[in-house]
Every structure is written in C-alpha cells, then in structure tokens.
Amino acid sequence: MLSVAEFDTLAEQVSNWKRWGADDERGTLNFITPEVVRKATASVVTGESFSLSMSLSLDGPQNGTGVPGRINPVRTMLAINTLMGDSPDSVAYSDDIVVTPTQAATHWDALSHCSHRGAMYNGIPADAIDASGATRLGIEAAGTVVSRGILLDVARHQGVDVLPGRFPVTRAVLEAVEEAQGTPVEEGDIVLVRTGQVRHFLAADVPSYRRPVPALDHDAPLFFHERRAAAAAIDNMPMELLPSNVEDVMLPVHVLCLVMMGMIQGQNWVLEELASACARDGRYTFLLNATPERFLRSTGGLVNPVAIR
C-alpha cells in the first residue's frame, strides 16, 4: 500500500502543470504535432480498419449504480414514417432521439472529469465545473485526436485470453510487454492496453465485466509520462484497480493521468479484433482516429475509435 506522502511524490514526478503555458487545456495531446501525425500514416500497411467501440444501446455496461445516475443510452423514436405533406405521395421521414451519459460506453474522460484537493489539470480550480458544465477543460478542448496508436497486449503476453480479476498492470508489466512486442512507445502515441476484460461484456456477462477487473496500478502513469504518450485507453470500465493500492486515494490513476499529467484516458474500448490482427503479423502500431464528439462543456466524450493498419 502506497502512503499519501509517497503518492504526492509520484504526482509531482509526472506533473505537466504549466508545461505548455498557464492557459493550456489540452495537456499531453500537445505531443501530437503535425510531424507525429505524418509519421503515424506510415503505420498503414494493409488498409484494414477496426472499430474499437461498443454499440450504443440499453445493453451497455452501465446499470446506474457504479457511478450514480450513469445509465446506458436510451434511444426512442420521435417520428415514424411521418408524411411531410397532405398528399400520400409526399416524402415521409423517421427520426430518433438519444439520452445518454457521455461516459456510458466507449469514451474518453475529459480533463475536467476529476479534481484533486480542489484543483484540476494545470491548477484550474475545481469550481470551474458548475451547473452549466465544464467552463474549462471540457472535452471540446481535446479537438482532433488522430495519431499513431500502439497496442500493448498484456493478456496475450501473459498467455491468457483474459487477465484474472485485480491483476495489477504495473509500469514493469507495460515495459515487459513493450519489449516483447519489439516496438517502443514514442512521443505522441496513443497507448491502448488490452486486458481481455471486454470479452465478458461481448459474451453478455455484464456482472463479470464490471468487477473484479484487471486494471492499471498506481505506477502505470509513470510509463506513459516517461514515453510522452498523448493518451491512453483500456478495455475495461474503471481504468484502474478498485480498491486502489494507495492509502486514502480511491482513484490514483485518474488523479495522476487527468489532473497531474493532463492526459485524457479512455475506457470500455473493444480491442479483441484489433489484437488478433496485430498478433497475426506482429505489427502493433496503426493510425488511430479517436476524436471525441464535441459536446460543449462535457466532462467526457463518446467516441467510435477507428484503427487503420
């Protein structure tokens, strides 16, 4: 168990506050330069593309209890074959409406999603979040998120389809997978961590998907920080071990990534088909378009990430 004092030292170690100026709201996405994007296109070899998102439906992973009020998307009809004129020859239209949390299924956490000791990334006060939403650090600040993606297939490296519950994905584990795959994480990369946990969801076993989960341990953010990763995502719901291994800090990875590093993080990503393709030819990098929906002032962003190999 890490003490609060030890956690504070770790937080200072990974902090990017003021790195890109006092007014910065993009954090580590600043590592994605035009040169990084140009180099990312070299990862496209076969032209295969993979959607990494869950379907948006009532059968999603949320049940309103893990995070109070966070439900699965509700979609209903506004109009069904409604004529636009009096004549039977008029055009008819159908429309839908959707009500959903922005973190219901596959999503990014915006930098406004968490605060610690009254502050968010870059020292922006937590009260920048009010009834109107995130007046600072909303998901729209992320802008376009396109870079080289790199898959770290922890489950395959461990020789299993799904890591056991509460398996700690530590900094050392990420380093070992990186070395075994033979492709180092580079500045501006978006790192995708596969635990295999989403297999429970795909098998319609939502209770097993929700808990207990293999996830990032408290020192994993050091790996992202040292490699200057632009963002990171995982194939489970909480991103990190629950309960945490840090005294009195329930979500240490959230604090280190979102608040201290200024690194958006993704949850509920579906990595199974992509992982199989990467394992077949040993190529674990790809062009990744993971631009979130621009819900203004939102603390999260629904996304349909697309990996192109």
Image: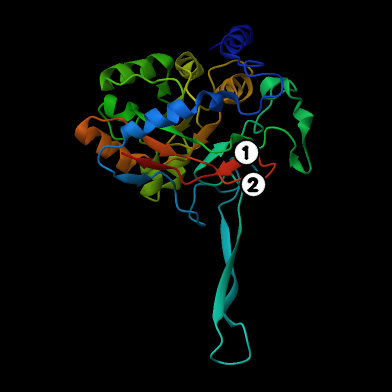
Mark 1 vs 2, N-terminal side: 1
Question: For the point 76% across and 25% down, which residue is it?
Answer: 125
User: As displayed, is residue 202 above or below residue 180?
Assistant: below
Q: Quadrant of residue 21?
A: top right
Question: For the point 65% across and 47% down, which residue is it?
Answer: 69
Q: Amino acid at mark 1?
A: Ile
User: Dots 1 and 2: beta carbons under 8 Å?
Assistant: yes
Mark 2, Cα crowd under 10 Å, few <14 / some 14-19 / many 20+, is some
Q: Could one spot residue 164 in this view of the protein? A: no
Q: Which mark is residue 155?
A: none
Farthest bottom residue in view = 87
Question: For the point 37% across and 48% down, which residue is it?
Answer: 202
Q: Along the horizontal axis of the image, is 134 left or right of 186?
A: right
Q: Which mark is residue 295?
A: 2
Q: Could one spot residue 292 in this view of the protein? A: yes
**Residue corresponding to mark 1:** 139
Q: Quadrant of residue 126?
A: top right
Image location of residue 56, percent across then percent down: 50, 54
Image location of residue 268, percent across then percent down: 47, 40
Count of numbered tags? 2
Identify the secondary structure beneath mark 1: helix
